[in-house]
Image (tube, rainbow, N blue to C red):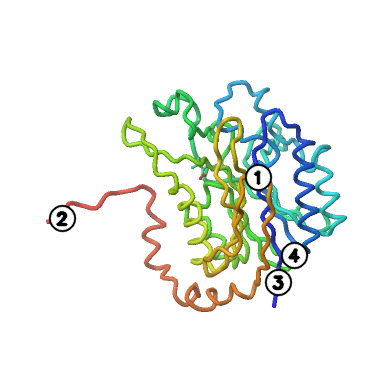
Amino acid sequence: MRKLRVAAAQMGPVAKDESRAEVVQRLLKMMRGAAEMGVDLVCYPELALTTFFPRWCIDSKDEFDLYFERELPGPETRPLFDEAARLKIGFYLGYAELDVSSGEKKRFNTTVIVDKAGRIVGKYRKVHLPGHKDLSTVGGTAKSGHVVNNFERRYFELGDLGFPVWRAMGANLGMCICNDRRWPETFRAMGLRDVEVVMCGYNTSAVSARRIGNRETLLPSHIGMFHNHLSMQAGAYQNSTWVVGIAKCGREEGHDLMGGSCIISPQGEIVALAHTLEDEVIVADCDLDECEIGKGGMFNFDRYRRIEHYRIITEQTGRTSPPAAG
Ligand code: CDV
């Protein structure tokens, strides 16, 4: 059996004034707990080092750049890498990346995979950026401080690295971030590269709203969690892969974020589920050979995928409605 013991290290809220050093201490505590349980790979949420700042529409670049990492590891995050190497444990971490390598500032919502020697082996930049660039496209209640605000399009550029899969720690590992999980193409892109474990950190409002025209109504409270799990369970099943979903949750700066961190088998079943809205580590033994049940059977892409029929869909650049019948 090819086994990878995986942990989802769910985080409770991170306050606006919580320092990086304080957050890193919380991450280290969970990393040590996971290592004691023999975990190979511990997974943290999206933008794990700070409060979820994209809920605010901040004008000053000097102000919002404080949430970004200029280097990883940097002085405050170095202890995570050193401890991982000491404990021989890998990790997946979300952070806001400020890239100045081209001579101009570029900002991304990013995750990395770090191996058991403390080396970065993979980087992913979020593709499906939700929300708004500024207040002009925000609906009425949101403008007045509604809980479902998201301004990721203001801060981040579109991810430019695709959805690669890396061979590390004896497994085929892939990453996505929060809103990416709602898009089947995310999982399929990695499924086509034989992914065996997809990690997905998220900051998702516990309140779901629907807007039709100018009218915004709240959805029943269970529906957000249903969609959270539905998306990841479908991605796992249809691509025969383990999926690890990791929440930052609880009441953060007056906004409620959902929990529900989980580890999902290639059959699409949740095998481990967080039960708090706080820092909490859940663990599962992921049998990587279990991926073969789907990859070699129901979802044997080479044999059963009907790419010639899908081409028409993938070549469509715009959306169309069906012609009127009769
Ligand atoms: N951080 C996120 O990507 N949040 C989105 C919301 C805005 C829909 C999510 O998919 O949870």
Q: Secondary structure at mark 3?
A: strand
Q: Is residue 303 above or below residue 218?
A: below
Q: Residues within 10 Å of mark 3 (few under 14, many from 20)?
A: some
Q: Nearer the viewer, mark 3 or mark 2?
A: 3
Closer to the N terminus: mark 3 or mark 2?
Answer: 3
Q: Nearer the viewer, mark 3 or mark 4?
A: 3
Q: Nearer the viewer, mark 2 or mark 1?
A: 1
Quadrant assignment, res 49: top right
Closer to the N terminus: mark 2 or mark 1?
Answer: 1
Quadrant assignment, res 311: bottom left
Q: Would you name the residue on which mark 4 appears? A: 169
x 47%, y 77%: residue: 303
Q: Would you name the residue on which mark 2 appears? A: 325
Q: Nearer the viewer, mark 3 or mark 1?
A: 1
- Asked if marks 2 and 4 touch (Cβ < 8 Å), the reply is no
Give the farthest residue toward the left.
326
Closer to the N terminus: mark 2 or mark 4?
Answer: 4
Q: Which mark is residue 278?
A: 1
Disc 4 residue type (three-letter): Met
x 50%, y 75%: residue: 300
